[in-house]
Amino acid sequence: MGRPLGQHFLTNKRLLDRIVAALEPHPDDVVIEVGAGTGTLTRRLAPRVGRVVALERDQRLLPLLGGERGMLGPLPENVEIVPGDALAVEWHALGRGRPVKVVGNIPYYLTSPLIEKALQPPLPVVIVYLVQREVADRLTAVPGSKAFGALTAGVQAVAATTRVCGVPAGAFSPPPRVNSAVVRIVPLEQPLVPFAEQRAFRDFLAALFGQRRKQLRRSLQNILSLAAPTVEQLLARCGIAAERRPETLPVQALVQLFHEIGALTRSSGFRKL
């Protein structure tokens, strides 16, 4: 079978169990599995939770996934297969009013949209994704590191991120060309940026880190079309030195800067990012 949708199926039982454990499974849990594939993770997960809703887009996999002709035998009775694109399906409706947990060995090319989708309110209890190792490094990076960037700050403003374990290419069939890692994402009870402002915050981060080699004074002048003294005053109100670069700022400082810029654009009529 080919893999036109970027699929690499995890077959290592020890690593599958690490993913299940990262969810902290409970017999009452409702779990949304993004991309069930051939059902290897589904079968390790189902006995430890109340219900699994397994999303699968590839129509060719559906006959292999469940039923008596399933590749690994019939699925447990508490598993519901939902055909379709995970980005188009309303996940929380599948939970039938219950809080959900989200898990998935997700296609690398859909990583950012599937993270954004998972962080839509009502927020899940926890998200555990198997992603490219480079993405895991960025999601869990600290300020000042090479991996710290727009994705880092955008996610860490609304969730706590931890790396669970690395996953070598040989654990998959077929093996990808890169190594992977499992990340655990837990939404914050009080996000640093309200949901209504999160898209604007991500746009701000994209613009700011698009000029990450520049000092903040210069990059904000370019982004906001403001004179240097105005930008320096803006940074001073945030307690940020004008010579610093974006990747050195903690997430809280980036959020404060975003809010100060928002206040300035509202009061002065400058265009918003």
Image (tube, helix red, strand yellow):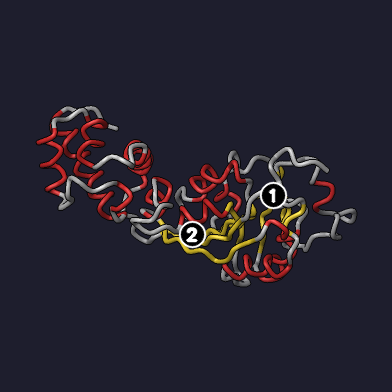
Q: Which of 121 and 156 is in front in this view?
A: 156
Quarter of the picture containing the C terminus is top left
Give the label, 2 or 1, closer to the camera.
1
Q: Residue 185 got which mark?
A: 2
Q: Where is residue 78 in the image (x, y as percent from the top left)?
A: 72, 62
Where is mark 1, residue-wise?
176
Badge 2 marks a residue whose secondary structure is: strand
Neighbor class of circle 1 (other Cα within 10 Å; few <14, some 14-19, many 20+) is some
Q: Residue 150 got which mark?
A: none
Residue type at mark 2: give it: Ile
Distance, label 2 to label 1, CA atoms, is 23 Å
Q: Where is residue 125 in the image (x, y as percent from the top left)?
A: 49, 62
Q: Nearer the viewer, residue 1 or 118?
A: 1
Figure check: 95 above or below 25: above
Figure check: 128 above or below 154: below
Quarter of the picture containing the N terminus is top right
Q: Earlier in the sequence, mark 2 or mark 1?
A: 1
Residue type at mark 1: give it: Pro
Residue depicted at x 41% and y 52%: 146
Badge 1 marks a residue whose secondary structure is: loop
Residue depicted at x 17% and y 45%: 242
